[in-house]
Amino acid sequence: MRSGFTTGSCSAAAAKAAAFMLLGGNRTEQIGIRTPAGPVYEAQICEIVIEENSVTCGVIKDAGDDPDVTDKALILAEVTRVPDGKRAVMIEGGEGVGVVTRPGLDQPVGCSAINSVPRKMITQEVTEVMDIFDCPDSLRVVISVPDGGELAKKTFNPRLGITGGISIIGTTGIVEPMSTRSILETIRLELNQKKEEGRQIAVVSPGNYGLDFMKKQYGYDLNRAVKCANYIGDTIDIVRELGYGKMLLVGHVGKLIKLSGGIMNTHSKEADCRMELMASAAFRAGADRETLKKILNSVSTEEAYGYLLDAKIAESSFRAVMERIGFYVKKRAGDTPEIACIVYSNQWGLLGKTENADAMIAEVLAEDKKEKEHD
């Protein structure tokens, strides 16, 4: 699959081209930059506007084969000469670039959402041009994305507290198709933000169903939790690295039953032994041969649970499941964080929870109430 280039790379290329035309006086429609990952990005320059004291250049983002919402977005950089004799590069966000309104992100509250690596790239490329033309003054770089306001609605930005547009991001300068790294960076970003806001317990769910269950069962605010998709093991690692003392994991049986077998990436391409694990728990609870066969031939965990109910061993089976889940998440986490887990079914509701779940839920709800009162 074909890789692409980040909004950070596009911004740096557009800024370099604009600085080159402003200081050198020559029009160019192609410019090269070195990405942090190493490869050179040869960007095509468009939307060129040359004025007496500034130049604006654009780059159309190419995300490669990644389904990025910013693919084909126009990234503009306006570079203006500031006659102050300081030789600095000043970077600002313009139209369509978000503004940070909550702590815990890459940039401080009130700043444009142009992350640190893109800022470094822009500074490096523009400074290189300043050196070529021996420019004694500063250059102001304003990055804008004309469609950024609309594009941002399709991103995590509103949830993260970034208003008014997209973020200029990228740690390598390269967009990898369906990048696991980018998903884990988003999970880390959300968890870190909630830590900065004072949360002591990381509340995590693989997806929206888990958050909906928390809302219906406990009245917990969905926006205060983090979705981890299939990356449960990696998320536990991130929670530990960020210094959380506790983590509450809530998820559908179809995902979390895999944890009872020590499987920490729940995507079906990694492992799919749901029925085998359900059958194993049923066997421990004394299931007969016919019940075990029905479970193993089930097409969903919901169907399999129905057979546990029929055999009157659902409660004892899931007591065993939760014991195994508790064992494996503790093995992954070590002594910290303490992890509590709740497993539910869309059809059957609450199926099981680890022994420490009730106490941790009470702490989560108390923390949530305190924060709402403070808000």
Image (tube, rainbow, N blue to C red):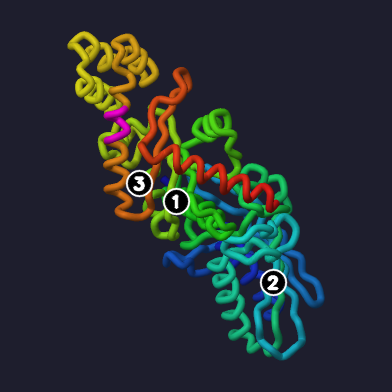
Q: Count neighbours of disc 2 (C-alpha within 10 A) and say few if under 14, some if 14 to 19, many if 20 or more.
A: many
Is 29 positioned to the left or the right of 286 in the image?
right
- Residue 233 lies, with reference to residue 270, above or below; the image says below
Precedes in sequence: disc 3 or disc 1:
1
Q: Say which quarter of the image contains residue 49.
A: bottom right
Residue located beneath label 1 in the image: 184
Q: Residue 95 appears at what percent x and percent y?
A: 75, 58
- Closer to us: mark 3 or mark 1? 3
Q: Nearer the viewer, mark 1 or mark 2?
A: 1
* Distance in Å between CA atoms under marks 3 and 1: 11 Å
Give x and y (percent) for residue 129.
60, 79
Observer-nearest residue: 318 or 332?
318
Q: Alpha carbon of mark 3 to alpha carbon of mark 2: how far?
A: 41 Å
In this figure, which residue is indicated by the disc labeled 3? Answer: 233
Which quadrant holds residue 240? bottom left
Q: Amino acid at mark 1?
A: Leu
Looking at marks 3 and 2 on the same chain, the residue that comes earlier in the sequence is marked by 2
Residue at the image position 27 percent from the left and 29 percent from the top: 320
Name the one closer to the observer, 41 or 78: 78
Disc 2, SS: strand
Looking at the image, which is closer to me, 112 or 101?
101
